Image (tube, helix red, strand yellow):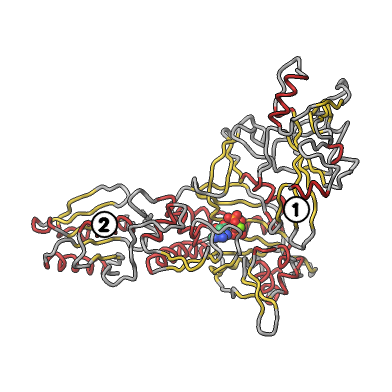
Amino acid sequence: MRMSSLFVRTLREDPADAEVPSHRLLVRAGYIRRAAPGIYTWLPLGLKVLRRVEDIIREEMNAIGAQEMLFPALLPREPYEATNRWTEYGDGIFRLQDRKGADYLLGPTHEEMFTLVVKDLYSSYKDLPLSIYQIQTKYRDEARPRAGLLRGREFVMKDSYSFDVDDAGLEASYQRHRDAYVRIFDRLGFEYVIVEAMSGAMGGSKSEEFLAKASVGEDTYVRCTLCDYAANVEAVHSPPVPPVPYDDAPAAHAEQTPDTPTIETLVDHLNERFPREDRPWAASDTLKNVVFSVRYPDGATEALAVGLPGDREVDAKRLEAHLGEGVVFEPFGEEDFKARPALAKGYIGPGALGEKKAAGVRYLLDPRVVEGTRWVTGADVTGSHVIDLVAGRDFSGDGLIEVAEVRDGDPCPRGDGGTLETARGIEMGHIFQLGRKYAEALDLKVLDEQGKLVTVTMGSYGVGPSRAVAAIAEGTHDELGLCWPREVAPADVHIVATGKDEHIFAAAERIAHELDQQGVEVLYDDRPKVSPGVKFKDAELIGVPTIVVVGKGLAEGTIEVKDRRTGERHQVPADHLVDRVTGIVRA
Ligand code: ATP
Ligand code: MG
């Protein structure tokens, strides 16, 4: 690759729409260009990195015996209808019609197609286990495409699927994939954590995510300060709380609490007018009831109330994960309240939500609201609250819901006395045991050893190579530019020839050629009329791990070798340069 002819233009200015460093730098260094919101063109440098990431994934998948294949992105509606995902995906997929009016979609993920192709070709337990995969372009009409490649509407995914005849087989296939993922992420060269995950819209049971540690990440995960528990915040359960005896609890009593529509005003009022003897009232003594209007992908709607301790908010991401893909919700607005006069805004209580169902709302409770706990909560009358309302005695809900925010310092669900710490990450990979959901929906059965038809059990394993390119850039860049780990860099060495002297260019040319012969991939800045300053800036921005500067030193027989990451420079005798650089590259 020669800078004089390489299809690249580096930019000094940040693109206006870039929110995060990786996006800014990938555009400025000439790796990608935006084609439409969440849709990007790969320029030669970017494509090199993408291909290197894909190759690492490919090697590790092949190493566990998974076989590569390729499905079309343009898919018929029927299989997605059979699993109900045509509907479940809601606005999340691109749907289109052919000239005859038949429905198609652009594949957001391919469980259906993989299941069907196995059904098509295999029929016996002897054919299993089987793992097949593809590296392919996916389409999702994301509600919030953001941060360049991190959340695209067109993106690259490696998706593999395992097929087994029984649960033990699935467990083994899952473990093999997990091990391969560990090797992939170790090689990709950035910091990551493996966390327990929600299985989301896919159904199924066991599921883990590989998250890149990154402050710009959209995922929050928790780790225990004592044990090895780590989970996506969506998947965190609060530790079970034992019921509290309530035999001597006083009867519930409604009190006048004018102008107390918020938890804060309520707590102040309680402490002023109804002081406790043991301690002051706290927000955690109150039961807050938050009502949402929810719309499901099939068009159905409902009002859903969440009852939780008043010191916690409903975490929208946890609620989203709980409700599933394609479900949209928003807090009750003025119109919703008008339509349900039983709900007194700011004073909503279990009276209207619970057994009496006056408001016709589904009422789910946080697990901290266990039997015997005592609450101050709305009396369903403006300006009034109930005190000493006992869960299980005075009210109950229609079930439990775990959507309250998780905080630093919350107890570890394993109950080992450790506490949780939260941090942000980018989801890089997701592995899960789908079980028989897809095989059942699409009727994938094989004959077992006894000649009986059994439903196949499946696993599904995804990694996002295009997202990985951005995440690696995000995790490794510095203030000067990109800074690729060697395994994924677009070249091994960036040679910069400086000055006007022809023999400098001739020497640089020779070095580039010799390195190339050694199998070292070279990006050579051979531009004759570009100043050294510009060339250095470009080299730093582009981020190839080793920079070789052929310049003035050549007169004394030395060439500079610079490490892009550490900035360390060495003057190397010109005769040793090729050996030295080859050594660095192969180290
Ligand atoms: P997210 O929660 O970030 O939307 P997801 O749970 O929808 O991700 P999966 O359906 O498990 O993701 O897809 C597998 C992998 O594909 C993800 O781990 C991620 O690396 C990648 N991926 C998913 N959505 C996108 C996207 N919009 N842009 C780029 N990569 C994506
Ligand atoms: Mg998603």
Q: Regarding mark 1 in the picture, which secondary structure is present there?
A: strand
Q: Amino acid at mark 1?
A: Val
Q: Is residue 496 left or right of residue 40?
A: left
Whether residue 307 is situated above or below residue 461 in the rendered picture: above
- Mark 1 C-beta to ligand 2 under 8 Å: no
- Relative depth, front residue between 426 and 303: 303
Q: Tell me which corner region of the image, top left, top right, bottom left or bottom right, holds residue 435.
A: bottom right
Badge count: 2
Q: Residue furthest left?
A: 555
Q: Tell me which corner region of the image, top left, top right, bottom left or bottom right, holds residue 123.
A: bottom right
Which circle marks residue 380 in the picture?
none
Label 1 sits on residue: 294
Label 2 sits on residue: 547
Chain-order first, disc 2 or disc 1 = 1
Whether residue 240 is situated above or below residue 12 in the rendered picture: above
From the viewer's perspective, is the residue at label 2 or at label 1 nearer? 1
Q: Residue furthest bottom?
A: 100
Q: CA distance from mark 2 to mark 1?
A: 56 Å
Q: Residues within 10 Å of mark 2 (few under 14, many from 20)?
A: many
Whether residue 468 is situated above or below residue 125 in the rendered picture: above
For image coordinates 30% across by 69% down, the residue present is 1
Residue 332 image point, x, y percent: 74, 47
Q: Tell me which corner region of the image, top left, top right, bottom left or bottom right, holds residue 42.
A: bottom left
Residue 37 image point, x, y percent: 52, 64
Q: Is residue 508 left or right of residue 344?
A: left
- Relative depth, front residue between 34 and 150: 34
Q: Regarding mark 2 in the picture, which secondary structure is present there?
A: strand
For image coordinates 26% across by 60% down, the residue present is 582
Residue 419 image point, x, y percent: 61, 32
Ligand 2 found in image quarter: bottom right
Residue 126 image point, x, y percent: 68, 70
